[in-house]
Image (cartoon, grey):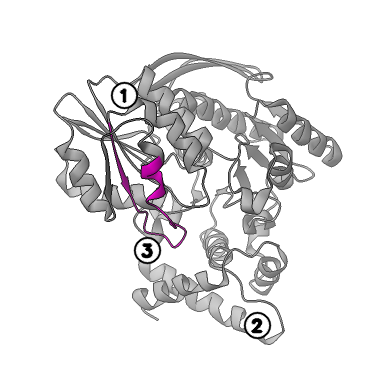
Amino acid sequence: MNYDEAMSYLKNLTKFGWNPGLQRIRKLMSLLGNPEKQLKVIHIGGTNGKGSTSAMIASILQKAGYRVGLFTSPHLHAYTERIQINRVQISQERLVNLVNTVKPYMDQMVEEGFEHPTEFEVYTALALLYFAQEKVDFAVIEVGMGGAIDSTNVVEPLVAVITNVGMDHMDYLGNTLEEIARVKAGIIKPGCKVVTAADRPEVLKIITEECQKKQVELIRVGTDVKYEVKSLSAEGTAFNLHGLGQDLAGLVTSLIGYHQAINGATAVTAILALEHFGIRIPLEAIREGLAQTEWAARLEVIRKKPLVLLDAAHNVDGAVTLRQALEEIFKYDKLVLLIGMLADKERQKVMEILGPLASAIVVTKPNNPRALDWQSMAEIARNFTPEVYLEEKVEDAVEKGLTLVGPDDLLCITGSIYMVADARSYLMPKQV
């Protein structure tokens, strides 16, 4: 297989859908010699902030001199983004070699009567095998969906992180916070340290119970480790952190928003938790790693005159965070909102949060089979402004949005990560 053939093969695996359970990935990893058992893992789950927190942790560990594997999803522009070592994406050639290595074992599984692994299960296997082959010092693994039944849950982490728990993926994870929290808490394993920034009582109750059951220590960001935001700007976020024997003042991350102080505090707490395993990370590496973290499409300013902001706020909690930033951080005369969301997301609630800020709203269609009835968001939007536009193609929606803003206005592009990624691809060559 060449790269295009390998990509076609992997994308074709979407026909197996999202099929919960660990039996297939466990069998596949067993056939591959259980490479996941060779890795020192930090496992990050939660509803929002997983990617940013994962990127911060990986950046800090890299600054400390370690070779760090990072597995995240979904990607923005290329599948190779999902699998990185020290910020370098896996090469196309290496990805093809890994697919060629893993494919015969998947064929063997089917011959033995197992269901075929799903696309995400295969990507998980490719990442874990690659990190083991490359003998990384640490593997930072972001949960795909949920936790207990997510294919990444074959790992045995040193530290398990649950950033927060909100209402998302209800079709798969449950219809209450308690149900969703129970699935998220499935990444907690005996022998690990657990870090969470979750603050909802019903969620903390579930996480605490799981920690007690597994006889592991729970470290709560906001209680056991306290943080205070010192400054918020369109250039980054500064905060102080106190706890676990540390008093760290003036920590700065280049990522924007109050929530990035929470994510930063969570990442630093996970790093400090490694001391339990005899791994002490220098404070200078913590500072440098935070300051140099990069994570695209999360309150990302891609143009300044006019301001063009990208943010993959695809659920209610993400919309709340985005609104807070729009109200407290960014300065502009008029806001134009460009939005497109998948059908299984809470479109009505998200529009109710963001719509009142906008003078004009452009609704578009994410490039995803789950973008059913995408035009319905326009009907919701008309409750907030009479100036509502429908543009099916993302590039046409971007151009429409740009015609609606002056030099002192802000165009906010948000919603499905698939749509935001397409908008980013279209805008990147046009940056000014």
Q: Nearer the viewer, residue 42 or 382?
A: 382
Residue 423 visible within the image: yes
Of pointers 3 and 2, the one earlier in the residue sequence: 3
Image x and y of residue 134, in percent: 51, 60
Point out the image quarter for the C terminus.
Answer: top left
Q: Find the distance from the CA under tag 1 to the CA under tag 3.
A: 31 Å
Residue at the spot of label 2: 110
Of pointers 2 and 1, the one earlier in the residue sequence: 2
Please identify the residue farthest to the bottom as the structure is shown. Answer: 111
Mark 1 residue element: loop
Which label belongs to residue 235? 1
Residue 64 visible within the image: no
* Magenta residues, start to end: 360-379
**Residue 257 drawn above or below residue 388:** above
Front: mark 3 or 2: 2
Classed neighbour count for the residue bearing mark 3: other residues with Cα under 10 Å, few (<14), some (14–19), many (≥20): some
Q: Nearer the viewer, residue 214 or 336?
A: 336
Residues at marks 1 and 3 touching, judged by CB atoms closer than 8 Å: no
Residue at the spot of label 3: 91
Image x and y of residue 64, in percent: 49, 36
Image x and y of residue 196, in percent: 65, 31
Describe residue 32's horizontal placement relative to residue 298 as left or right.
Answer: right
Task: Tell me what residue is drawn at x 63 percent, y 59 percent.
Answer: 151
Q: Find the distance from the CA under tag 3 to the CA under tag 2.
A: 28 Å
Amino acid type of disc 3?
Ser
Mark 2 residue element: helix
Q: Is residue 343 magenta?
A: no
Task: Tell me what residue is drawn at x 78 percent, y 42 percent.
Answer: 191
Q: Is residue 375 magenta?
A: yes
Amino acid type of disc 2?
Val
Which label belongs to residue 276? none
Residues at marks 3 and 2 touching, judged by CB atoms closer than 8 Å: no
